[in-house]
Image: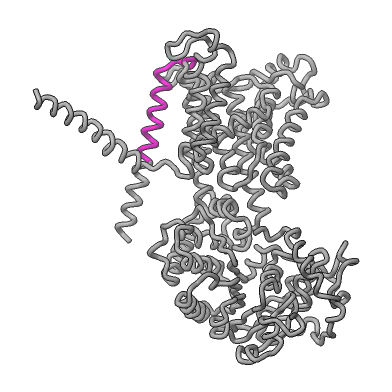
Amino acid sequence: MRLRNEGEHDHEYVTDSSRGDLTFMQETTDIQIGELSPNSVLKVENITMQFGGVVAVNNLNMEVNRGEIVALIGPNGAGKTTAFNVITGVYEPTNGAIYYNKKLIVENKPRGKMKKYYSGQNAGLYYKSISKTPDKITALGMARTFQNIRLFKSMTVFENVLTAMHVRRTSNFFTAMLHLNFSEEKKMREETASLLELVGLSDVKDDLATSLPYGKQRKLEIARALATHPKLLLLDEPAAGMNPQETEELTQFIRYIREKFDLTVLLIEHHMNLVMDISDRIYVIDFGRLIAEGNPEDIQKNPKVIEAYLGGSDNG
Amino acid sequence: MENAKKKSLIKSLKYAIFFVLLFAALVIIDVKNPSYSMIITVLKKGTVYALIAVSMNILNGFTGLFSLGQAGFMLLGAYTYAVLTMTNEAREAVYYLSGYSVTFTLPWYVGLILAGAVAAFFAFLIGLPVLKLKSDYLAIATLGFAEILRAFSQWAKLEKITNGSIQLRDYPTFSKSSLLEGTVFENASLTPYVLIVSLCLLLIVLMINSTYGRAFKAIRDDEIAAEAMGINLAHHKRLSFITSSFFAGIGGALLAIYQSSITASQFKSSTTYEILLIVVIGGIGSITGSVLASYLYIACSEWWLRGLDSGSFLGLNLPNVFRSGFRMVVFSVIIMVIVLFFRKGIMGERELNLDRVGWFFTKILPSLFKKKNKAESGKEAVK
């Protein structure tokens, strides 16, 4: 999958055109700009992501507080992964702002062609244009995993994790080339070994990453993300393709690393057992719009959510 | 833990001994043979090409950037060295048409380092627009820049520096050095090349095994994942491009020293393809593969397959078939066979492993002999 190719969304446009007039669904928002709760780690504010005429994420508002496990769910094609990509800097949002640790890291307004074609809301609210590349955002302390596993294929398990430590290096190119940073290198290697021990992959550390079974590859991706020392971990469908037993193990594992590393977790998931079991709060999006927010019990009862997942009466 | 340390110490000692022996062997060959003999010529050119091929491998093999600009950076290195190290007396003769504007003379080692630095600086400039491209587009753009550099060096307005399209010669070369006169190394001409290239290769190996080398490999394996792990793509691609060009520049300067005269017209895109061929034969992403392949390639093209061009080959005397140009036909067939059946080259992505070499010599070879002995003793028993 090539994330930066906007053309990929063209086919969605055809199916989405039956959705009707967007202005019809607009609601007034009562979100105050830059208003953050005291424990806020991540705040997504009025984010709209529009590709050509397709609004993939429409006026999304989310807030993740310190220590929470928050799930982002929704039917297929709802815009969950797009929202993730906006948060991690792969896409620049068309409009809106993102705060990380109470600091503004991303802000954008419709620019260029989008000025004319913008069909989202709150167009006049933002005036700055700040964006960060994914590596800068990772360096701030936000690490992610991918929906379709993206390990470094030619490297061993150990090297995969070791490579992710590169972001926290203090050496420059020349000191690293002449191996004058051996104490740092040694520390990196020790830390990698202990991290692999912790996630239970130390027995396969010299195997090629791609030779691992599926569940372990997922675990390795999480370990690699942890190697960047994140404060916020974003997991994109960590249980995809896992059987119930593996899913149960993963649930325990996520809880464990949250305690161990003092993490905040935001995850996208389709396995409802996992989501309802693990989440402190859940955001539900459909057609790029937030339709519900709350704790697992409320979400399960919410008629809008049921309609989105099972189809309402007017959808036939 | 103690045991592991001991093991790694023994391993590095083994490699050190291996390379010292290899170096000693090369020096002995150098001292024993006159500098015009075929083996010295092949080893010299092979050594220079090894550095250039490895420099290309940094980019194409380790960072996954398919660039075809190597000839351009070699040209920059070669010209920088030649122009800056020539003496004024030599310049009088070389720039006989246009006169010369560079009037100072630098020692050869400064020239060599500057050759790399100039190539690296141009790589930085070219990299600014070009490294935003991907795969084939990057290859086309770098190829274009290499051709521009070649055309630029032949530009009439730069005649006083580059001597237009006339060749440059009479700059310091190793064979003319009077430093070692009267010693065993009097006619040693290969050793300086081996020393300089070994030093460069050592730096490259150290770089590949550092945290930056791992970042390069991560970019090769998966750009999106690498970026998500905090690796700044633009910065690291630029670093890789500059490093590669730096060593290509030094390689170009060494080529100028080897040839003792250079013209811009020899740094065509076909030079780049030659080096690309070496990289592919050796294995994309293997340093030892590139080194082995460059010796093999140079030995074939300069020595072993010479007969294909001059009438008789392997005892066959067919002047109608084996005439000028037939060597290139055979080469083309070899390339096709490699691309079709041995896509990973000699080494693939692996490096030279002494354990495997040792295993070959201690287990495989004796077992072959043993079989023979058994068969012979069996025969005797029948008798």
Give how far across and how far down residue B151 sits, in percent: 76, 28
Position in image of residue A2 (x %, y %): 67, 58
- Figure check: A211 above or below B293: below
Q: In the figure, is residue A213 to the left or right of A299?
A: left
* Magenta stretch prevailing secondary structure: helix
Quadrant of the frame with the N terminus of chain A: bottom right
Q: Is residue B169 placed above or below A40 in the rendered structure? A: above
Query: Residue pushed farthest right?
Result: A116
Q: Position of residue B305 (x, y in %)?
A: 49, 19
Q: Is residue A253 visible?
A: no
Q: Which residue is located at x 48 percent, y 23 percent?
A: B299
In this picture, is B217 found above or below B203? below
- Position of the C terminus of chain A, as image quadrant, is bottom right
Q: How is the image coloured?
A: one colour
Q: How many marks?
A: 0
Residue A188 visible in the picture: yes
Q: Name the side, left or right, on which A279 lies relative to B83.
A: left
Query: Which residue is painted at 61% across and 77% down in the image?
Result: A266
Q: Is residue B193 above or below residue A236?
A: above
Viewer-closest of A228 and A125? A125
Boundaries of the magenta span = B16-37
Quarter where residue A274 is shown:
bottom right
| Magenta residue check for A135 | no
* Residue extending farthest front: A316
Residue toward you, B383 or A232: B383
User: Image point 74% across, 35% down: which residue?
Assistant: B144
Residue that appears at 78% across and 70% down = A16
